[in-house]
Image (cartoon, rainbow, N blue to C red):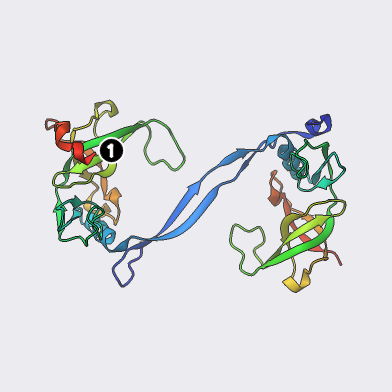
């Protein structure tokens, strides 16, 4: 505990909730596939591919028709720059958080893009998925996306 | 759910999703004086000049009257259990092994109860009105923390009648 000059004590105060949530059938399949190095999307009755998958069609609320492999390349639809990554971030160098619409998908997913600056990752940039070397069944199994030359 | 979906459901069925909120807490002047008292193994409260209520830990202003608090008062290490609960459920980060007792302890001369642990007896012996005293850690281990009181232990004195502590529950 520190003692600032005005005599008022100060200390770190960390509040933690160690939740573990169950994934349900669709997200279980999605994370299991990630662990195995495969990316899945949800095909809706109207034929759209939702990546990452949802349990229900976001437009109609109907159950999804099924899960199928999604492309590992796509385009950036929006991006922001993380200049000072924190320990909890997967990339420790500055990186872009981007919405990435994978080829054939109708929705975009949020993930990190490893690039030198935000200027190097404008909307429309083509990126490809980079898998983590050790995978456990989490979104971190995707290490990041990288611009495609 | 289609058969195709079911077929790929395997063993990743849960995910850790911890929430961690990192603050820097400032104790404020009064709580700082209370915590410094803990390091000296003294319990410091403060008196309201208007209603004469004694608050421990002390506060800057009386919650009832709204006026600035008056003199500090060092309180005795003895008191009475007003309410308590027996903790039987284990949880992450728990320091004591259940079952153990958390209690509101009304120190002698104080008007609000201090929340702390009760030790030194079987959990089933703890009761409302039970007389207790603070069991301090060794002087060398005293810190700027309420944990400088290890827990409250029974004194063996007769219980205080509930009528005497009712307004402090």
- In-image side of B59 versus A1 (left or right): left
Q: Residue furthest top?
A: B124
Q: Residue furthest left?
A: B157
Q: Position of residue B125 (x, y in %)?
A: 24, 27
Residue drawn at the location 22% of the way across and 53% of the way down: B139
Q: Residues within 10 Å of mark 1 (few under 14, many from 20)?
A: many
Q: Quadrant of the C terminus of chain A?
A: bottom right
Residue drawn at the location 84% of the way across and 47% of the way down: A70
Query: Mark 1 sits on what residue?
Result: B103
- The answer to which image quadrant residue B115 occupies is top left
Residue drawn at the location 74% of the way across and 39% of the way down: A55
Please give the chain letter of the residue carrying mark 1: B
Q: Secondary structure at mark 1?
A: strand
| A138 vs B48: above or below | above
Q: Position of residue A20 (x, y in %)?
A: 58, 40
Residue A38: in sight, yes or no?
Answer: no
| A126 vs A50: above or below | below
Choose between B139 and A65: the one closer to the eye: A65
């Amino acid at each position: 505990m520190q003692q600032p000059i005005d005599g008022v004590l100060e200390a770190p105060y960390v509040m933690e909730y160690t939740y573990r949530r169950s994934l349900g059938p669709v997200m279980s399949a999605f994370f299991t596939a990630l662990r195995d190095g495969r990316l899945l999307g949800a095909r809706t009755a109207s034929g759209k591919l939702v990546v990452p998958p949802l349990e229900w069609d976001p437009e109609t609320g109907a159950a999804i028709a099924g899960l199928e492999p999604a492309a590992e390349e796509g385009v950036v639809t929006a991006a922001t720059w993380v200049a000072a990554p924190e320990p909890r971030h997967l990339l420790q160098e500055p990186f872009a958080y981007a919405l990435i619409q994978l080829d054939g998908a109708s929705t975009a997913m949020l993930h990190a893009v490893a690039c030198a600056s935000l200027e190097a990752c404008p909307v429309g940039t083509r990126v490809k998925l980079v898998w983590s070397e050790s995978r456990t069944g989490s979104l971190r199994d995707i290490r990041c996306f990288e611009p495609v030359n | 759910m289609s058969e195709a979906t079911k077929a790929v459901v395997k063993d990743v069925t849960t995910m850790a999703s911890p929430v961690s909120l990192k603050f820097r807490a400032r104790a404020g002047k009064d709580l700082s004086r209370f915590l410094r008292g803990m390091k000296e193994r003294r319990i410091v409260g403060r008196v309201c000049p208007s209603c004469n209520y004694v608050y421990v830990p002390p506060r800057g202003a009386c919650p009832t009257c709204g006026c600035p608090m008056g003199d500090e008062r060092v309180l005795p290490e003895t008191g009475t259990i007003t309410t308590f609960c027996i903790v039987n459920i284990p949880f992450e980060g728990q320091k004591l092994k259940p079952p153990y007792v958390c209690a509101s302890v009304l120190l002698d001369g104080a008007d609000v109860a201090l929340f702390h642990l009760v030790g030194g007896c079987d959990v089933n012996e703890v009761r409302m009105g039970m007389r207790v005293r603070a069991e301090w850690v060794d002087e060398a281990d005293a810190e700027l923390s309420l944990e400088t009181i290890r827990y409250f232990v029974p004194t063996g004195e007769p219980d205080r009648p509930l009528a005497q502590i009712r307004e402090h529950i």
